[in-house]
Amino acid sequence: MNVLINITWQGQSGNYLVNMDPGVDDNTIKNICEEAVRAGEVPGVSPNISKNAFANFVIDRFHGDRPRFVVRPKVPFG
Amino acid sequence: MREVCFILVQEKILRVYFGSATSIPDERERWETIWEYRNEITEIAHSHPGEFLDFSHEDLTTMEAVEAGTGKVFTWSIATKRRLLSRESGTDHLRNDSPWWLGLIRQLSYGTIYPDKRTARRNSELSRGGARAGRTIKKRKDPTT
């Protein structure tokens, strides 16, 4: 199934369309996104990205006929 | 006691969030606010119980994530009953100043009045600088949607 993933990194935001199981775990999605950015496959987001860049990010999942994920920084405080 | 978070634009409170006695949970709307106003936000402050005047692991990883996501460096502050600590560009310093919102975050955190919901900008906040902010904060299309 095609999933549209919105990725935010270093003040840039871009969308990446990928065919994947929408039920895949968060870490796999983060790895897919990191590699997509690094490969220059996310328009609007510079490919200059560090390893494990999304370690402290979370995935918001919007399911439906056209599932959409948002990869964003976590924002809790302890 | 409950932890309270203020997102600040200079001296104006942009958003208020309420948590429990030990944490303020993740909330997508908070990130959307930070993203939308990333060029205007100057400081993000929250309160800690008692005199725990340091950033927790949760705080530090959130700070790192937000700055990585926005590409911006913010001032991050911890307010306790008697002290205020800020981190700017990786350096912590105890503050001797007393911004007007410090009394409010302490009242909301340690006082007896506990609003049960996050509040958006209220008239009372607007009167404290909303007109000024109204000239500087422009609504933008949310690029994360």
Image (spheres, helix red, strand yellow):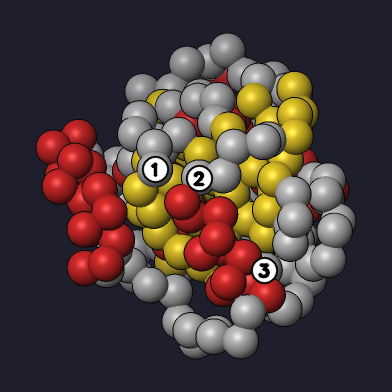
Mark 2 or 3, which is nearer the eye? 2
How many residues crowd around disc 1 within 10 Å: few (fewer than 14), some, or many (20 or more)? some
Is B31 situated above or below B49?
above
Res. B99 mark: 2
Label 2 and label 3 in one chain: yes
> What residue sits 73% from the left and 23% below the top?
B90
Q: Quadrant of residue A43?
A: top left
Tag of residue B11: 1
Tag 2 and tag 1, C-beta contact below 8 Å: yes
Q: Residue furthest top?
A: A48
Disc 1 on helix, strand or loop?
loop
Q: At 20% across and 34% down in the image, what residue appears?
A: B136
Distance of label 1 from label 3 (alpha carbons): 20 Å
Which quadrant would residue B39 be assigned to in this image?
Answer: top left
Q: Label 3 belongs to which residue?
A: B3
In the rendered structure, which amino acid carries the disc numbered 1?
Glu
> Mark 2, chain letter?
B
Q: Residue at x 51, y 64 (%)?
A: B104
Which kind of residue does numbered mark 2 sit on? Pro
Closer to the observer: label 1 or label 3? 1
SS of the residue at dot 2?
loop
Q: CA distance from mark 2 to mark 3?
A: 18 Å
Q: What amino acid type should be assigned to the residue bearing mark 3?
A: Glu
**Front position in the image: B31 or B18:** B18
| B66 to B16, vertically: above or below | above
Determine if residue B84 is in view.
Answer: yes
Mark 2 is surrounded, within 10 Å at the Cα level, by few (under 14), some (14 to 19) or many (20 or more) other residues, namely: few
Q: Residue A71: horizontal and vertical position, in percent?
A: 53, 47
